[in-house]
Each structure stands twice: as C-alpha cells, then as structure tokens.
Image (cartoon, grey):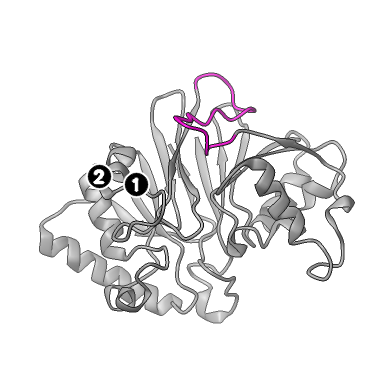
Amino acid sequence: MKLTIWGCRGSITTPGIETVRYGGESTCFEILTDENETIIVDAGSGIRRLGNEIARDKTRRKITLLLTHSHWDHLAGFPFFKPAFIPGFTITVCGGDDSPVRVLESLRHQMDPPYFPVDMGAMKAEFVIGCNCAEGCCDHRLPMISPGHRCESIALNHPNGGYGYKFTGKTGRSIVLLTDNELRYRHPGGPDRAAYVDFCRGAELLIYDAQYTEKEYERTISWGHSTFRDALDLGVDAGVKHLAMTHHDPDHSDDDLDRIAAECAEYLASKGAELSWELCREGAEYFV
C-alpha cells in the first residue's frame, strides 16, 4: 500500500510563509491499495489538489471516501473536489461519527445556502452509501476493496465522536490512522488507552494526532487532541515500526515544529526509548 499526505494541519487551513515546510492544508490522506484502488481518508482542504490529480488520471474512476468525523476541518475541501463534479466517477461514502447517511448529509449541508454558492446537485458523480463503522463489532468492510485487504475501525476519544482506522494489505502489514484522538481524557463512547495500544500494536506505520505541547494541553484538556509525548509513548508501547505525528496546530509555524521535533528527540532519549518517528509533512509518501 502507498499512503500520501495531502493535508496534515489541524483545526483550520493555514496557508502562508510560516507553514511552507510542513504544510498548511487541513486533513486529507490518500491510500492506494496493492490493487491500485483509491481510498481517501477525510476531506479537509488538502482534498482539492488530490482531486485535481485524480481527475487527470483516466484509470481511476472509483473512489472510497472514508471520513473520520464531521468537524469542518475534515470536510472543508469537499466542495472543491473536482471528481465529484464529473460524470462517470463513483464515490462511495463510508465511516464518520455516526452512519454514512448522516456523513453524506454533513457534506451536503455545508454546500446549502448561504454557506456555498453551488449546492450538491451540481455534482454529477454517482454517490453510494457505504459501510457504517458505528455497527457493533464492525470489521469495516469497504465495498470497493479487493479480497486480501482489510479495514478495521475504533472509536475516537473526541468531542462528537468519530472513528480511527487500520488498513491491512495482502502482505499483512498495516497502516493505522488515528487523527483527532485524546489519550488522557475519556469522551463519551471512547475506549481507554490500552485499547488504542492493542489497536496500533505492530503497525508498520502509525499516523497519530499530536496537536499540543504539554504546556498547551494544560488549557486544552478535553478538546479532543493528544500531545507529542502522548504520541511518542503510544508508538513505543505499541511497538510500531514508524510513527508520523499529524494534525499540527494552526499556531505552530515551521520553526515551532522544528523546535518541537528537537524536544521529541530529547524526550525519547531521556526515556531510553527507541522509535522511528517524524512530524508529518504535506506531500510525504509512505510505502507499506
């Protein structure tokens, strides 16, 4: 599988000279399966550029859009997703904080007047209601994924709910994507930390929420996000092969993130822990 980061900024899109190196687009990840099938996780502002690339590729006309939840920074790019306006594309909507029907309505609602000048009726792609990860014991069978691949879901500790996902390819190696998750505070329906350690255990790649520093977290507890130390500790305890920290705070410039990276290295050294890790950068690609 191949994962590409099209957006890794949290809360709001942050373009400008201070975010060039790590990127300012809000959350959007593209996963290509071993069979070259397209899964898009979240429709933040980064989905616009991804959509432009897909529209130019004549071999890709079926897309699975998997949403973690319906907060605006994860939906904001959808009205600018070019394949949605082109006849012949099929977009299967899955996941989210409740049912895929409700998720589709969230996408539709943000285009209703007076929020957007064009309503969803202008989109000529075929929209299909996919799977519902809110079902009990859901193994999240994505309808457009070939045999040998698997997607599993886990509830997030986040206001208004949501789901994180584990994608396992034919080789048995997995990608875990847990954005907008708080490890130190239990939100309604959210699992405990041990459940996340088990879910991430042995993953080849863990993309994990690390929005706050420890000082920032003192005033943002219960807001639904983890700290850099939370992410590092989870990566170590779960034995993941590589950790990439995402959902960068909009007030963290490139220089701020460089300083945070140096603090992360010091923190791991102080614990005597070994872990391959980095801060997510827009445009980065991972092969699993």
Residue drawn at point x = 18 percent, y = 51 percent: 274
Query: Disc 2 designates what residue?
Result: 194
Residue drawn at point x = 41 percent, y = 48 percent: 189
In the displayed structure, 264 sits above or below 256; it is above
In the displayed structure, 176 sits above or below 234; it is above
Span of residues in magenta: 132-148
- Counting labels gives 2
Mark 1, other Cα within 10 Å: few <14 / some 14–19 / many ≥20: some
Q: Quadrant of residue 266?
A: bottom left
Query: Amino acid type of disc 2?
Result: Ala
In the displayed structure, 44 sits above or below 167; it is below
Residue drawn at point x = 43 percent, y = 77 percent: 252
Q: Find out whether the residues at labels 1 and 2 contact each other: C-beta distance under 8 Å.
A: yes
Image spot of residue 202 (x, y percent): 29, 36
Image spot of residue 136 (x, y percent): 47, 32
Image spot of residue 63 (x, y percent): 69, 38
Name the element at disc 1: loop
Query: Disc 1 designates what residue?
Result: 191
Name the element at disc 2: helix
Image spot of residue 282 (x, y percent): 53, 60
Marks 1 and 2 sit apart, C-alpha to C-alpha, by 8 Å
* Residue furthest top as drawn: 147
Residue drawn at point x = 34 percent, y = 51 percent: 243
Query: Amino acid type of disc 1?
Result: Pro
In magenta stretch: residue 147: yes
The C terminus, quarter of image: top left
Q: Is residue 9 left or right of residue 212?
A: right
Main secondary structure along the magenta-highlighted residues? loop
* Discs 1/2, front: 1
Camera-nearest residue between 186 and 104:
186
